[in-house]
Amino acid sequence: MLYRETGQFKTTYRADQAIFPILQDKIGVLAILAFAVFVVPFAADNYLLETILVPVLVFSLAAIGLNILTGYCGQLSLGTGGFMACGAFFSYKLATAFPDLNLILVFLLAGLGTSVVGVLFGLPSLRIKGFYLAVATLAAQFFLIWVFNKFGWWTNDSPSGVISAPPREVLGFVVTSSEAHPISKYLFLVVLVAVLALVAKNLVRSRIGRSWMAIRDMDIAAEIIGIRPLVAKLSAFAVSSFYIGIAGGLWAFIYTGSVEALAFQIDRSFQVLFMVILGGLGSILGSFLGAIFIVLLPIALNVTMLAIDPTFSVALVSDMEFMLFGALIIFFLIVEPHGLARLWQIGKEKLRLWPFPY
Amino acid sequence: MVTAPRVFNEVLLEVRRISLSFGGVKALTDISFDIRKGEIRAIIGPNGAGKTSMLNVINGFYHPQEGEVIFKGETRRAMRPHKAAKQGIARTFQNVALFKGMSTLDNIMTGRLLKMRSNVLLQALYWGPNEREEIEHRAFCEEIIDFLEIQAIRKTPVGKLPYGLQKRVELARALAMEPELLLLDEPMAGMNVEEKEDMSRFILDVNDHFGTTIALIEHDMGVVMDLSDRVVVLDYGRKLADGTPDEVRSNQEVVDAYLGVAH
Ligand SMILES: Nc1ncnc2c1ncn2[C@@H]1O[C@H](COP(=O)(O)OP(=O)(O)O)[C@@H](O)[C@H]1O
Ligand SMILES: [Mg+2]
């Protein structure tokens, strides 16, 4: 009696439309959350918290953002890095200009600001699709990084171009800058990311989410049922950029503590895109799986290769990393475009039937 | 079985002197006809006659160079399809146009989009008014699911369904819009006899049960004669005939142009 829905007859549409219709899933998610909040902070050491869990959480949020745009609405974007930079620099300007502004509000406002930028750069999507749109978002990427590099105003004229997050508190605990304790950083992120992931899940299972998916799957048919492509696409850009912007703010303020525009170059866009592809296009769960996978892979590779032969050079390890990524991306694009999330689902379906094969 | 012809008086849609061309190709030339409230109106004609183009003009996909479309008393030449949807025109496509990555239920739910009111913030919270709205519309979609007998596939991604069922889901999505005018572009193309019978029954039931006015493109003359109240015949973009199935069938020009030759 591991994973069965037997006996869980849904007698109301409400029960059938619940966020986790299967009891085991609901218990599982609650258990993971409880574990993440009550056990992990005390069991994990600082290395695990700061080098693995914190970036996983920040990347998950960015991946959710890109997944909304690319996975749910079908608009390919290579501008993720640029939008993260917006979030980072908007947060910095807000936090330094208004030192008393609540930190959560700082991130939300920075997210909203990024939404506006996202919508502006999303306008071409009304005319162009696919490859051409990707090129347009690439232009956004380069333009935004150029803007943050070029004008000292964004860094409050820091000579190095680096911004350092000011220490800010939430509920009496410092969570930003190097003053923050890893446990505080982690707990703040867990709660914030869980809430935002829940919101994303709600959106994609509501009307707006269905309008995104309709545009993705067949835009002509979407229009004949009354969806305005303009509204659907730009709302996807807005919500997506909101998430990515907040992720950028969290990156600068909590993960690294100090950052320059170059941290958000095109590599970052690709990194998040790979998370979405590997994790699963059109899946919130997949965004988490992709983030975990891509943060862990280099670390795991490093450990195993050095365990095999301690004389392996750093360069070789990083070359291996690139090759492995490349192979995985190609594998997933060809064999399983719905990524790890789909593999997880297939696993669950097998488990549902287990041990009876039919 | 011979029944007295049904009579319809109120004009729901009128197309007036429509001409449409693509570069040099004249798809439609000076076409006028009307569709009356409550009737099943067939549009027939050989391949390339301009039938699909006519539906595309009606629901705003194509903008004709000349002529106008009058729907519920409102005149227009060019409008976007989503506007037409808002005014109460739904349609299905000759080649199924479903949302392949979504389940049957979600596809049908998209048909309710224009009827849903929750704003984005409510949707983000889900709980409360948005949940009530989702459930209410879900219940409506379930009625259509029962009506079209597709209960067993409600959670199946439509991309995995056989063609015949996809056509049925597409009809379900159009019905979910509660349209006043339903445009069906070859709803039975590529179906076997049994599936055709089912689909014919559904079309009659929809017309009967919901009172929906239907414009139907169909090749199978038997089906057209059985289903439709009035028929308009197109050939090479021109209107060849317009009348009851019996009138059309006995029109010599139509027989020569269309009925005489096999399609
Ligand atoms: N988008 C288009 N671009 C160019 N030509 C078109 C287009 N749509 C239809 N046509 C032309 O218009 C004519 C009528 O086509 P169509 O309306 O699809 O006919 P039917 O549905 O009766 O088979 C054909 O000659 C077709 O090639
Ligand atoms: Mg056609």
Image (cartoon, helix red, strand yellow):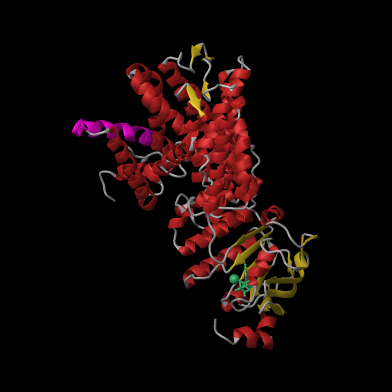
Q: Residue furthest left?
A: A309
- Percent across and percent down for residue A233 are 60, 46
Query: Does the image show residue B5?
Result: yes
Task: Give the quadrant of ligand 1.
Answer: bottom right
Q: Is residue A220 above or below residue A209?
A: below
Look at 30% across and 36% down and name the residue there. Answer: A315
Q: Is residue A342 above or below residue A100?
A: below
* Image position of B96 (left or right of B64): left
* Image position of A297 (left or right of B57): left
- Percent across and percent down for residue B213 are 68, 63
Q: Is residue A308 magenta?
A: yes
Residue span colored magenta: A292-311
Q: Nearer the viewer, residue B227 or B6?
A: B227
Q: How many numbered marks, from 0 up?
A: 0
Q: Is residue A43 magenta?
A: no
Query: Does the image show residue A108?
Result: no
Q: Nearer the viewer, residue A185 or A51?
A: A51
Q: Which quadrant would residue B17 be assigned to in this image?
A: bottom right
Magenta-drawn stretch, dominant element (helix, strand or loop): helix
